[in-house]
Image (tube, grey):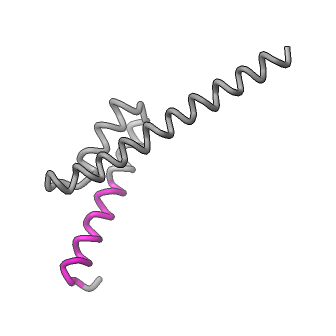
Amino acid sequence: MGWRRLWSARRRRKRCRRRSMLFFVVGFLVGFVGPLAGVGGGVLITPLALGLLGVDVNLARAGGLLVATSSIAGSLQAGGCES
C-alpha cells in the first residue's frame, strides 16, 4: 500500500511541474508577443488562460485586468506622466 501512495505522489508532482512550466511558457510568450503586436498582454492572456490552461473565467479576467493595469501604469511612467 505504501508504494502506491509514493507512486501517486510522484505522479502529482510531475503533473504539477508540467502545468507550472506551461504557465511559464504562456506568460513568456504573451510578454514577448504582446508588445510586438502593439496590444496589452491582457488581450492575449485571457483567451489563452481559458482555452489552453483551463483556468476559471473569473480568475482569467482578473489576470487580464492585472496585466492591462500594469501595462497602463508602465506606459504612463514611460511617457513622463506623474501619478
Q: Quadrant of the C terminus?
A: bottom left
Q: Residue 61: percent from the left, percent from the top? A: 35, 46
- Residue lying furthest left: 38
Quarter of the view holding residue 59: top left
Residue appearing at x 50%, y 34% in the figure: 19
| Residue drawn at (36%, 42%) of the image | 26
Q: Which residues are magenta?
A: 65-81
| Quarter of the figure that contains the N terminus | top right
Q: Is residue 15 above or below residue 4?
A: below
Viewer-proximal residue among 7 and 52: 7
Residue 66 at x, y = what percent?
36, 57
Which residue does the image show at 31% across and 62% down from the upper left?
A: 69
**In this view, 81 is above or below 29:** below
Question: Which corner quadrant of the image does residue 65 belong to?
Answer: bottom left
Measured as percent of width and height from the top left, residue 12 is found at 64, 27
Residue 10 in the figure: left or right of residue 3: left
Q: From the viewer's perspective, is residue 19 above or below residue 43?
A: above
Q: Nearer the viewer, residue 23 or 57?
A: 23
Main SS, magenta region, reads helix
Asked whether 66 falls inside the magenta stretch, the response is yes
Residue in front for this viewpoint, 37 or 65: 37
In this image, 42 relative to 1: left or right? left
The residue sitting at 28% across, 58% down in the picture is: 68
